[in-house]
Image (cartoon, helix red, strand yellow):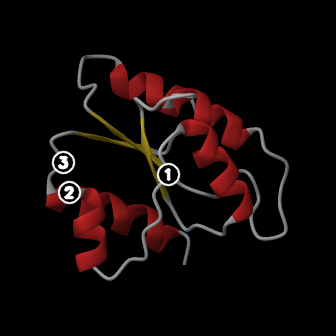
Amino acid sequence: MARLTLKKLGYAVDTVNNGKKAVESVYQTPYDLVLMDIQMPEMDGIEATKAIRSLPPSPHRSKTTIPIIALTANAMKGDEKICLEAGMNGYLSKPLKRDQLIQILNRHLLRNC
């Protein structure tokens, strides 16, 4: 649903199927924002976020600037805090609501313009 909504809003979207590929992609590609699934194979979203935050700067990105937003079915008390403590900038729980996605995109993308 997030991918379809983002495309309808005019955003270019890349997806990867595991946390290790997410880290590699963020290092190699100048993304404006990352929606990070928490439950992924090989490396979960918490570990991937920590790895991204510890990457050395690349020619197109400093390690502290890219907003990372948790996108997760984990909606128990304390889950958002875990994501934020891992270095994420925001939290969206599934099922994803279009208005919430738009709001968080506006908050984090407009800040970086």
Q: Which mark is residue 87?
A: none
Question: Where is mark 2, residue-wise?
Answer: 1
Tell me the kind of residue under disc 3. Answer: Leu
Picture residue at 23% right of the left edge, 78% below the top: 8
Q: Which mark is residue 16?
A: 1
Residue 106 vs residue 76: left or right? right
- Asked whether the beta carbons under mark 3 and mark 2 sit within 8 Å of each other, the answer is yes
Picture residue at 16% right of the left edge, 60% below the top: 98
Picture residue at 49% right of the left edge, 29% below the top: 41
- Secondary structure category for the residue under label 1: loop
Tell me the kind of residue under disc 1. Answer: Val
Mark 1 and mark 2: span between their CA atoms? 15 Å
Q: Position of residue 61 (x, y in %)?
A: 74, 64
* Residue placed most toward the observer, 99 or 38: 38
Q: Earlier in the sequence, mark 1 or mark 2?
A: 2
Q: Within 10 angstroms of label 1, few (less than 14), some, or many (20 or more) residues?
A: few
Tell me the kind of residue under disc 2. Answer: Met
Q: In the rendered view, tell whether residue 46 sits above or below residue 24.
A: above
The quarter of the displayed image where residue 91 is located: top left
Badge nearest the viewer, 3 or 2: 2
Question: Where is mark 3, residue-wise?
Answer: 96
